[in-house]
Amino acid sequence: MTDGVSLTGGPACPVPLSASARVLLGHGSGGKLSAALVRDRFLPRFTNPALAALGDAAVLDAPDGRLVVSTDSFVVSPLEFPGGNIGTLAVHGTVNDLAMMGATPRWLTAGFVLEEGLSFDLLDRILDAMAAAAHADGITIVAGDTKVVERGKADGLFINTTGIGIQSPDFRPAPDRIRPGDAVLVSGAIGRHGIAVMAVREGLRFDTTITSDTACLAPLVALLRDRVGDAVHALRDPTRGGVATTLNELAQASHVGIELDERVLPVPGPVAAACAVLGLDPLYVANEGLLVAFVAADRAEAALATLRSHPLGAGAVRIGTSTDAHPGLVTLRTTIGGRRIVDTLPGDQLPRIC
Amino acid sequence: MKYLAEYHNPALAQALVERIRKTATRRWVLMEVCGGQTHTIVRQGIDELVAAQVEMIHGPGCPVCVTPLEQIDRALHLAARPDVIFTSFGDMLRVPGSASDLFQVRAAGGDVRVVYSPLDAVDLAVRSPDREVVFFAVGFETTAPANAMAVYRAHQLGLTNFSMLVSHVTVPPAIGAILDSADNRVQGFLAAGHVCAVMGWREYEPLAARYRVPIVVTGFEPVDLLEGIAMAIRQLEEGRHEVENQYARAVRRDGNLPAQELVARVFEVVNRQWRGVGEIPASGLALRAEYAAFDAERRFALGNIRAQEPAACRAGDVLRGRIKPHECAAFGRECRPEHPLGAPMVSSEGACAAYYNYGRARLAAAGSA
């Protein structure tokens, strides 16, 4: 890669077509347009020695500890939403999966499937957001790939990222470490990301002050590791399917029951309002910067104080307790004192008729 | 969200529960008509809080659930046509027809789109002049004004590529049919607040008088429902049978007159089949002759599509309040939300789905309810 390459194309670029404002099929040809695309738009933003070598693969120094690897593909419509875009998600989504294993995220690879006709202005905003998100959390994008498909064959662009992190030997949260009696904590408000995206979706636009909660959770996890340590039994980020789906997965994986208290669920007013209108349950709405923690009961207050000491965890609350009473089931005590099961859904939540 | 918080207020709810417990000298049988109310009751565990004072029977007021199977099959037939863009509210997509559902039709290439207002379907027809846009008009009186408005607008715009598959039903004839049935156990009704916001409650007054049953127009939040139950039980204890309005913040006796006028201009009252219940006289709405051009059944000649309900499904008994959902042999076994035999297991407002999703039977089985 070369420093000082013009990002605006024009005089600095010998190939006239690259002045196009949009992605062309030729940008996926492997020829000069492809090279210019990578050189002008990707490398300047993601610059680092491993990437700059432009080899067939990145070469990394092996660290101490165990490597944790996760991959995730990102398809979101619309590509931009209040609080972020698909680029922010592509970083946060994958590094949060590493963080939930107690790992410190270090490296990312990124594959891009671009649709012919995607505007470069939009692509630039997405890449800027990716670079900023990675930089903010000390993560290096060490390898990448771009492909271009015909118009109509992708929804603007798809991104796949693979992340690598390092797990320390004395902090390994996992579902099988959950015990009856553990406190169930969430780090903040429930349902923001899903509602923010729905509010700008074609055919369903509505006004809301809600922004996506998309954020890198690694700093919160580092604080928990340093101050609460082994008493943190399990961590999970409740993305697609929301808090309810995540808790069901954990209840089944750990063979414990989980009891929630509806009165203390941190659902922001605008999320509750949008859900009430659309007939949705905020417990099933996606989050992208929220974690659920299972913590030994005697360390629950310490874990809450730790979460609340960081801006990302300022709204942390205890929402329930694990129990041996009904293994695999998640139950909820309702605001008015009733009781019900919180199940997984067969598919997406469907907005109701009236 | 002051409004939401107030109507979930635990202290207020507890006070109402106490009032119901003090008022009732025996156990009464009430029916909440509307599926939205069923949803809140089961989700919040309201019926369990007052189980000693009242048995709640879950009424037929889920529009998804009472849409006849053959109407679903007609929708599937239309949605599969290459010239059709089939538009629907989201919760109709998973309702099983005889052989398939709208999700499967879409996966097989049908152009099925979720809209949030029938007027969006009209806009789509304007933007897609070379396609036929069909809207699946399902619902009670609540959705009828917007659907009437869509037809009226399409008429004004002179659209020739917009039509509606209409399966509209109305509440009062269903209440009459329930009260007329020989094995009826219902002693009082919670009428659906949203329906009455449109229609008012004048048409319920003859029902209350003729059948000597209390009818309380009731809202949808937990405190609304507890208050509606308390009002109905007080009437029963005092031997009264009146129409009362719990949902005063949204409902007036006359309802929304301009909305009623629009509905009457576009639709006429017809006999209508209710899934699982059968035909109820004068219980449905169909497009008037002058709007026949917008009637998908006529436009696409769908009259020859007929269907047979699956034998194992006892949706009719559930919708008439004869059995509770979990008393059906198929419940939770061959009939589950991801593989529903009948519509009440599909819609979030269906009684079977509410029982399944909120886990009544499983909680009891786990021995900790």
Image (cartoon, coloured by chain):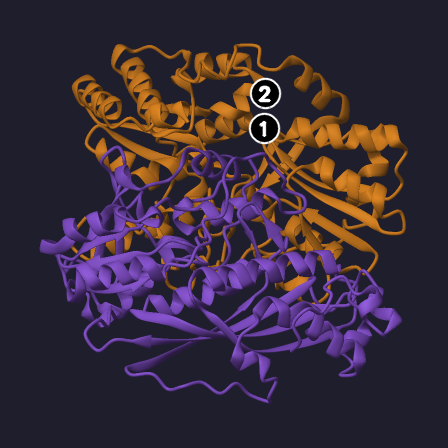
Chain colours: A purple, B orange
Name the secondary structure under disc 1.
loop
User: Marks 1 and 2: CB-CB under 8 Å?
Assistant: yes
Q: Position of residue A318 (x, y in %)?
A: 23, 47
Depth check: B113 or B186 in front? B113
Q: Give me the residue at 34% from left, 23% from top.
A: B6
- Residue corresponding to mark 1: B142
Instruction: Please tell me in which quadrant of the rendered image residue B321 appears.
Output: top left
Q: Using residue A198 as the reference point, say whether residue A16 is left or right of it.
A: right
Chain to which the residue tagged by mark 1 belongs: B
| First along the sequence among labels 1 and 2 | 1
Q: Amino acid at mark 2?
A: Val
Residue at the front extreme, as displayed: A4
Residue A308 showing in the rendered view: yes
Residue A334 showing in the rendered view: no
Q: CA distance from mark 1 to mark 2?
A: 6 Å
Name the secondary structure under disc 2.
helix
Which quarter of the rendered picture does the C terminus of chain A lie within? top right
Whether residue B313 is situated above or below residue B169 in the rendered picture: below
Depth check: B161 or B308 in front? B161
Instruction: Please tell me in which quadrant of the rendered image residue B328 appears.
Output: bottom left
The local crowd at label 2, few if under 14, some if 14 to 19, many if 20 or more residues have their Cα within 10 Å, is: many
Q: Amino acid at mark 1?
A: Thr
- Residue corresponding to mark 2: B198
Q: Using residue B58 as the reference point, say whether residue A2 is left or right of it.
A: right
Q: How many marks?
A: 2
Whether residue B119 is situated above or below residue A42 in the rendered picture: above
